[in-house]
Image (cartoon, rainbow, N blue to C red):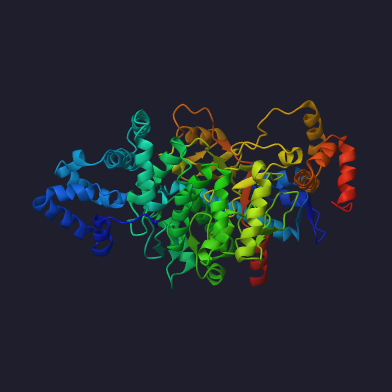
Amino acid sequence: MNSIPLSLLDNIRISNGPDSLKNYFGELYHTNRSRLVELLNDPHLHFYTLFLLKSGIYAHGLQENLGPIYKRALQIADMLSETIDDQVQRRNAAERRTKIRKDLRAEAESVPSALKWIVETGWDTDMPEDKYELLLERCTAMLIREFRDRSVLPQIADIIFSRNRSGLLIHNLVWLFFEAKDPGSLYLLAQRLGSASAADVSLAKKLLRFIPEIRSDKSDSSTGEAAATDTPVSGPALYYRAVRWLSENMPYLYFTGESMQMCTKPLFCQVSLEAKYLGRPVSPDTGRIQAPLRDSEAGLLEDFRRLTKAQQQQMADFSRMLGSRDIYQWNSWIGLPFSRQLEAVSLMTGGSE
Amino acid sequence: MIEFVSGDTDLQAILDQYQQGSPEYEFLRKMADSSYIYRFSSSEELDFETNMRRHIIDASLALFRGRLAFRIFQESKCNEKYWIRRRDGGFELRPGASASEAVDDIFRNTRLYGTECATAIMIIYYKAVLDSYGPALFDRTFRSITLMNWQEIDDLLNVATYRSPPDYFPGDCLYVRNPDVDPLTPEWQGENIIDLGNGKYYGHGIGIGDMDHFIKALNRNRIPGSEVSAYLMDSVTRPDFRALYRHWKNAS
């Protein structure tokens, strides 16, 4: 699942299973306690191993011998596990969640780094698909949504694709990945278009369907229906197309809030054509142009909104193309009255919509 | 506006088949009054869609009355006699099992099943197709079925999402999004709901109510202190009524 080196305890768990790990822990506690503490503090230890040993650690009072991140990680696991049990029992769940969040917030120095360690090392294809998986989902959600940590997105992308190859649930992880609302992270998905794994390519195409280069869209402009089919282009060629499109449209991309729980073919992102036309970046969260518009820009947008979707697309693409080629020419063009801008586009693109 | 390629024009006669206030009447009236042109090959095709939308609503009410349990994927459950529970929490029709019996079983032995809201919508769709086709054609048509929210749906259903649709109708599936959902309850990030007509909706796990009911229910699962409300997204999800009709017509 990840490329972090394994500690001795992790090796025992992976090679011989959780029961052998627990037996080894029990034996070592009686024969060489200081060695056990040393192993539990191995910087390469994975969270799943620590989690499996949690009851033994508590039973022998060893939590006080753990380093601060590992100790905090176990505390977080206890707190968030409680919210998972609440989910089933539904007793004062909301109040308890509020208190847990407040407690975690109060330790803002150590909690994010402990959460990050849990997320980076805790997802494991061999882990049980039960409350442990839910715990990992909660930890990932807290890290991304509550503590706004974007640095973990490369690992999340790895986990998503790895779990997908194993036929494991990825929907909430995909939702969280896009909830981070980091346009730069989309390159992590595009990388998989060139993967040797067919499952990776298929998933990357599904997640990047908002890129026209990825799909050939037979859209009905009246209904907005998107009956898309995959483009036959594949491999590195598709990757380069996607990367080029992302680079061109990055300042104007925003996250739509669509998810795999919402529909069959979600469009996770969209380009603000208005922003692309004016050459003004948008908030990835809302899609709104970030800085206030000048009066002249507001006037141009009024005219722009009267165009059909296809015309808007053409104007936006033209504006971006001209701006990237010759900023002085673009400045002259965008300064023209709207009707003159349309004439110029028509002239330079052959007159068709 | 409704147009028939076959030249049928007596829309009033079609409307007269249904009581005012019924979901069927609301569907036809809205379509007829729309500025968007809805084209059908014949009045028979329109009848098929009208009836299937009714079946979608009936199946929603049946799931509600049967008290289908709300379970996240990790805790989903099914009757293993008919379905195999997959590692990702989805259900697959057991090889050799009758698809019609398996779908009916969800409505007969509802207590044996538990799933989240999107898979509940797929169950509703398959039940509506079963009630439209009858068991014999349904079994011939669906040799395998996967129930896993919106993924791995049979091509014939061709479930599609329409963004900024001109109209919403009874039997449509809508989505209420909860942008500030509590990260400790990601299952409430949004709710798929079926339009039951007359301003009422069914959403698995929340129940039946007007739009405000669903928005309030999702808002209760926001980050404490959030002022960003849940909202209805401007999109609609529908099975491919036309393809389902053609398959039924060709098989009849």
Question: For the image shown, how many numbered marks are present on the structure?
Answer: 0
x and y, in percent, of residue A80 in the image: 33, 40
Instruction: Name the quadrant containing residue B234.
Output: top right
Give the side of residue A15 with respect to residue B91, left or right: left
Give the side of residue A292 with respect to residue A305, left or right: left
x and y, in percent, of residue A95 in the image: 36, 30
Q: For the point 61% across and 46% down, which residue is it? A: A269
Residue A185 appears in view: yes
In the rendered image of this protein, does residue B147 appear above or below residue B215? below
Give the side of residue A65 with respect to residue A228, left or right: left
Instruction: Name the quadrant containing residue A111.
Output: top left
In the rendered image of this protein, does residue B142 appear above or below residue A169? below
Q: Nearer the viewer, residue A230 or B97?
A: A230
x and y, in percent, of residue B198 in the image: 61, 39
Residue B170 appears in view: no
Q: Nearer the viewer, residue B193 or A127?
A: A127
In the rendered image of this protein, does residue A161 appear above or below residue A336? below
x and y, in percent, of residue A333 in the image: 85, 39
